[in-house]
């Protein structure tokens, strides 16, 4: 018999780890435990279920537990909440219904994900203040907001913007509160974020920037007011979108070191500080491909890859390394696709670079070819080295995703503005102008060199 591997969490990282471990070791005994109903699930899809784009919550899971177990010969337990980890005896304890079940392990992978952040303010525990994290909870969430006519969304990050759009699709009045001067404050610069503000307002979002929520009030235990530093607002429901924090409780019980970001410290092999214990996904911290510094990024693509690394190394030893991340991300805000990778100009300055930037408008097709649209691109470079540090792109076409992926691939390899300019990108009148928008941005950023 092979190693006994126990994986806590069946989301992106956990399911990915289980699949990779099985592929590399046909003899391993693999058990995956999840406290929810779904595995291999996609929390990023919840706003689209709320807004009616996705019809059934079950569609947010790639596999059913039964399918995953059968295809990969993995023991899958749902509604199994692990509550304790004993690293001395290499055992975890889980509640399954009315029973406590013990699982022995040779290798443990902690993939417990993240929890929604709640504000520690007066009234935070009132009924009608909603969070979203797990797909099996989405039907209840949609049922709650469907009852409302006015909904407040607290937080202008990715989830906040996506939920705001979903609620408008349901015909709700939406008030969006962000305590910083602009939406997406940690991932976009203010000049680019203004384009998003215009799109939100155009689509009926009541935007409250620089307005910190300081409390909630209710009647009969149900929220009916949002209190900010500037005033009070009547609402029927509140959706919290202020971000997530790593769910490290079990990692702490295992004795694993918590890193400077508040997530579980791991090395490039996804090993924690405890022998034979790995961590992957939103519970674990990672590091920047640009600065090398530790950072926390709760995104599905890195989580899946971290799971692959943890699963491989759980059965093969130090077989794979995780290189780090750029924080590449994209979302849709009504008619705009909003994408970014690397550092913002503000972040670059804070990290000690000497950033310069260029912002351009460019068409997605040749000027004479019908159907093209205009995209806005901001490219940020370190003036000293010429290295491109970040790119932000906003436009009304899915091609924005392709552009940001090209930028991420180049930045991840340390590309300079010269590398961007000479990148051998494709051209055809229906698909791109002869001067690709990314090359044009590099040309402008070079300040007359090209």
Image: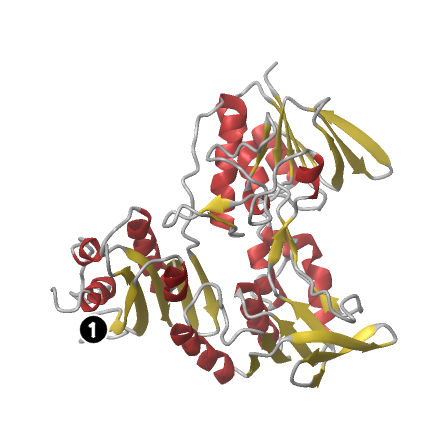
Residue drawn at x 62%, y 80% is 175
Colour logic = secondary structure
| Side of 230 where 393 appears, left or right | left
Work out which quarter of the rendered image holds the C terminus and state it: bottom left
238 or 57, which is in the foreground? Answer: 238
Task: Identify which residue, 123 or 353, lies in the foreground.
Answer: 353
Residue 326 position in % (x across, y down): 40, 52
Q: Residues within 10 Å of mark 1 (few under 14, many from 20)?
A: some
233 above or below 36? below
Between 92 and 135, the residue placed more toward the observer is 92
The answer to whether 165 appears left or right of 151 in the picture is left
> In the displayed structure, would residue 34 be above or below residue 117?
above
Q: Is residue 56 visible?
A: yes
Say what secondary structure mark 1 lies in. Answer: loop
What residue is at 56 percent from the left and 65 percent from the top?
53
Residue 220 in percent (x, y) is at 88, 75
Q: Residue furthest top?
A: 1
Q: Mark 1 points at which residue?
A: 369
Residue 304, compared with residue 119, is above or below; it is above
Asked which quadrant contains residue 284, the reply is: top right
Please give the count of numbered marks on the rendered protein: 1
Residue that protrudes farthest toward the front in the picture: 352
**Left or right: 24 in relation to 107:** left
Residue 171 visible in the current orientation:
no
Q: Quadrant of the N terminus?
A: top right
Where residue 31 appears, as percent x and y from the top left, is 66, 29
Percent position of residue 64, x then y = 63, 42
Quadrant position of residue 444: bottom left
**Rendered view: 361 above or below 274:** below
């Amino acid at each position: 018999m092979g190693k006994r591997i126990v994986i806590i969490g069946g989301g992106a990282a956990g399911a990915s780890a289980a699949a990779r471990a099985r592929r590399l070791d046909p003899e391993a005994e693999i058990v995956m435990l999840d406290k929810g109903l779904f595995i291999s699930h996609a929390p990023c899809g919840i706003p689209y279920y709320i807004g009616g784009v996705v019809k059934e919550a079950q569609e947010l899971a790639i596999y059913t537990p039964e399918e995953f177990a059968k295809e990969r010969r993995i023991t899958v337990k749902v509604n199994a909440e692990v509550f304790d980890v004993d690293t001395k005896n290499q055992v975890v304890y889980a509640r399954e219904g009315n029973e406590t079940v013990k699982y022995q392990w040779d290798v443990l992978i902690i993939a417990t994900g993240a929890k929604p952040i709640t504000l520690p303010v007066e009234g935070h525990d009132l009924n009608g203040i909603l969070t979203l994290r797990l797909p099996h909870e989405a039907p209840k969430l949609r049922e709650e907001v469907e009852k409302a006519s006015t909904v407040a969304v607290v937080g202008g990050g990715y989830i906040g913007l996506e939920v705001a759009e979903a609620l408008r699709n349901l015909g709700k009045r939406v008030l969006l509160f962000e305590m910083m001067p602009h939406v997406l404050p940690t991932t976009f610069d203010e000049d680019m974020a203004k384009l998003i503000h215009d799109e939100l307002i155009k689509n009926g979002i009541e935007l409250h920037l620089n307005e910190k929520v300081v409390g909630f009030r209710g009647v009969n235990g149900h929220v009916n007011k949002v209190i900010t530093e500037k005033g009070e607002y009547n609402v029927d429901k509140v959706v919290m979108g202020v971000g997530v924090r790593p769910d490290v409780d079990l990692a702490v019980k295992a004795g694993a070191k918590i890193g400077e970001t508040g997530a579980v410290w791991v090395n490039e092999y996804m090993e924690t500080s405890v022998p034979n214990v790995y961590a992957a996904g939103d519970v674990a911290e990672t590091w920047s491909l640009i600065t090398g510094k530790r950072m926390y990024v709760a995104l599905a693509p890195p989580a899946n890859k971290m799971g692959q690394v943890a699963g491989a190394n759980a059965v093969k030893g130090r077989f794979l390394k995780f290189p780090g991340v750029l924080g590449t991300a994209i979302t849709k805000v009504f008619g705009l696709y909003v994408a970014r990778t690397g550092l913002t100009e503000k972040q670059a300055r804070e990290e000690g670079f000497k950033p310069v930037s260029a912002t351009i408008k460019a068409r997605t097709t040749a000027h004479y070819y019908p159907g093209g649209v205009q995209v806005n691109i901001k490219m940020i470079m370190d003036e000293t080295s010429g290295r491109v540090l970040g790119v932000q792109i906003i436009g009304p076409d899915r091609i924005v995703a392709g552009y940001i992926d090209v930028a991420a691939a180049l930045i991840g390899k340390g590309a300079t503005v010269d590398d961007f300019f000479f990148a051998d990108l494709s051209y055809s009148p229906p698909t791109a102008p002869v001067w690709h928008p990314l090359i044009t941005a590099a040309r402008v950023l070079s300040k007359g060199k090209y």
